[in-house]
Amino acid sequence: MYVRSMSVEAVREAMAHLRAAYDAFAATDLTALTRTELVSVMDDLETLTCRMPTQSHRLLMRLQAETTPKLMGAKSWNEVLRIRWRLSSAEASRRLHEAADLGPRTSLLGEALAPVLPAVAAAQAAGLITGEHVKTLREAMRRLPAWVDATTAAQLEVDLVRVAVGVGPKELRETAELRLFLLDQDGPAPDDAERARKRRVAVGRQGRDAMTPLVADLTPEAWAVWEVIFAKYAAPGMCNPADDEPCTSGTPTQAQIDNDTRTLEQRQHDALLVIGRIALMSGDLGHLNGLPVGVIIRTTLQDLESRAGIGVTGGGSKIPIADVIKMAAHANHHLAIFDGATGQALALYRAKRIASPAQRLMLIARDGGCTKPCCTVGAYGCQVHHARTPWRDGGHTNVDDLTLACGTDNRDADTGGWTTTINSRGECEWHPPPDLDHGQSRINYYHRPEALLRPPEDEETDDTDETDETTDETQGGPDPPDNQAA
């Protein structure tokens, strides 16, 4: 115990010295320095900046050895970093993976092990490479084919680090690409395991023009399936949105073929859209979280009436109102979810523990996705959570008492130290356990950014009575928020 106490004091003292040294440097006057002296000081600062991430690696690896995300009240280490230090999911993931590759490790018996990438870690600890170098080196080593042996991989890492010490990230990337290309020429032909490792369909971030990029590496079997589908549905004249009556089955007319000015890429895009519509309209896709698989869109009555604005899907994608109206003509997936339009009772109270489909639709339109702060899971990936009072404690299955939560967060509200309440505006607030509480927002605005634009007086004059509950099971749910519908 005495040895541990001394160690803790040493760490705290060292951190205090580090902060004091920074404060002392920040308080210095730089006006007396010459150009040469300024550059020299900047050299020292750059070296320290390059070295600092190694301490973060040490701390992260120790933290992961000391406890678990669940004990801290989170579902993953990524979430711990996102909540505690207000990072994006991508930045949290980068730090965790970088620490795993470059941080100190221990065996199951407690023996010290070298980092996964020892040469990169040593260069970073010495301040010889920047964060961009580290990113390029890690990416190059990740792309090594599975058949490369450990000795060859270690030699390649050393060679690339030696290059990185003397050049910029761009030159390093070009050298790494060349080395990987030359290395792959001598390797065996790709096998099933290598193809399975590389398979992917990556969906990019939706752009300001509402377009979403899609990149894929398909296995031979997957491409064989889509190859014949495209041969049918992406043929000239097929599935052309410019036609008054697009041909989606059978054979297009010669006029439809002659008038088709689309590129192959555009025809394949239109084929994907039509095939998706056919799958949705077939009714054979089963259920997703209690609802038949289908596109659910929420928007406002004003936007529908003016034919302007956007709708938001259950997955969080934005769709222009013109497309919403066009999509509604193909199938009945776009349901009016409020009682004034559906005629369904939304307030079930204690009648059932499981929310009805009508209630789920109401929650999808109101919440848009998981309501726990920092969670980006859309409505399609969420469950219904009794937010005001748990069912086991007498909570009501009433839409006013329910909210959306992804599966993991739903469980965290029961066993992970998180608690939920409903405020006077009908919003679900999540209260974190002490280890993750830094005074952050209790409300998730990710799926409802429009709520951030609410004027301050709306909060002050809101006279909603949180304790007023309707007990008649024949009553409908509350009015749509801001005249929203789906």
Image (spheres, rainbow, N blue to C red):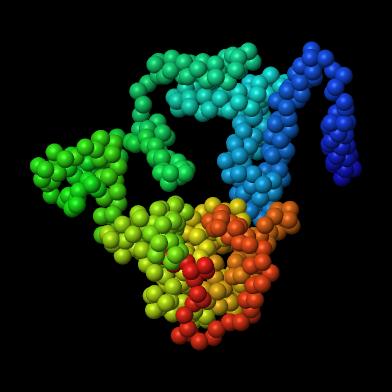
Q: In which quarter of the image is the N terminus?
A: top right
Residue 221 occupies which quadrant of the picture?
top left
Relative image position of residue 188 (x, y in whole percent):
37, 21
For the point 47% across and 19% down, the residue is 177
Relative image position of residue 88 (x, y in whole percent):
60, 44
Is residue 222 or residue 318 the one in the foreground?
318
Against 62, residue 118 (above or below) is above
Relative image position of residue 121 (x, y in whole percent):
66, 25
Relative image position of residue 413 (x, y in whole percent):
61, 63
Badge count: 0
Q: In which quarter of the image is the C terminus?
A: bottom left
For the point 35% across and 29% down, the residue is 191
Residue 423 occupies which quadrant of the picture?
bottom right
Report the residue that reaches farthest toward the bottom. Answer: 472
For the point 47% across and 54% down, the residue is 316
Is residue 385 or residue 337 the one in the foreground?
337
- Residue 351 relative to residue 256: left or right: right
Report the residue that reaches farthest toward the front. Answer: 306
Against 243, residue 196 (above or below) is above
Query: Quick check: can you spot residue 241?
Result: yes
For the point 66% across and 50% down, the residue is 83
Is residue 104 or residue 479 the one in the foreground?
479
Query: Quick check: can you spot residue 40?
Result: no
- Residue 389 relative to residue 226: left or right: right
Residue 271 occupies which quadrant of the picture?
top left
